[in-house]
Image (spheres, rainbow, N blue to C red):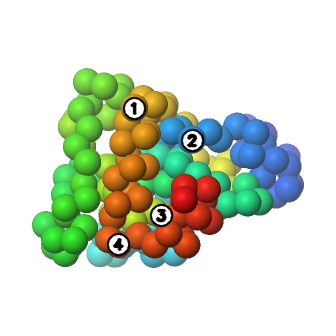
Amino acid sequence: MTKLSDLLDEDSINDIAKNTVHIGDVYRIKMDKTNGITPKKGDDSRNKFFIVLGFDSYGNVYGGVIINSNINQRVPQSIKDWQMPIKCSDYPFLEHDSFVDCSRLKCANSNKFNTWKYLGFMKQEDVELIIGTIKESPNETTGHLAIFGLY
């Protein structure tokens, strides 16, 4: 079976992404060290839930945060302190209560948009809380936030 993405060039996929992806959307995307994710031993990447929070000025790179099932106890306290709990009862795409990592923005390129799986969207009040929290994180810079229109 041919997928639509197999028929489109990269520019067309980027155009679709620019007109389809919105702040607060949640996607399951494959992430790796280039996105700031450390894969498990033996793996090249990990599937993560990614909440879109902003776009670069060209709409080609998305800034957002990831959802983790648990807080990794091996990360520094400066990252643990910036985990925001969310309830699975509020979000049907979650299988259990989880945590939004608001310690630092992660990046995702729109050229991989055709491999993302749309899961749903965050409540507006949660998006505002996440953005407010990440702006206060000592692990984030105003310059990095500004790239995605968050400062």
Q: Which residue is mark 3?
A: 106
Question: In terms of secondary structure, where does tag 3 sit?
Answer: strand
Q: For residue 17, what is the image quadrant?
A: top right
- Residue 11 pos. (x, y %): 85, 56
* CA gap, disc 3 and disc 4: 12 Å
Residue for point 25% across, 48% down? 84
Mark drawn on residue 125: 1
Q: Disc 3 or 4, which lies upstream in sequence? A: 3
Q: Nearer the viewer, mark 2 or mark 4?
A: 4
Q: Which residue is mark 4?
A: 139
Residue for point 51% across, 43% down? 27
Question: In terms of secondary structure, where does tag 1 sit?
Answer: helix
* CA gap, disc 2 and disc 3: 14 Å
Residue for point 38% across, 57% down? 134
Left or right: 107 as drawn, with respect to 6: left
What kind of residue is marked 4?
A: Asn
- Residue 86 pos. (x, y %): 26, 38
Residue for point 26% across, 30% down? 88
Q: Disc 2 or 3, which lies upstream in sequence? A: 2
Q: Disc 2 or 4, which lies upstream in sequence? A: 2
> Is any part of residue 112 visible from this angle?
no
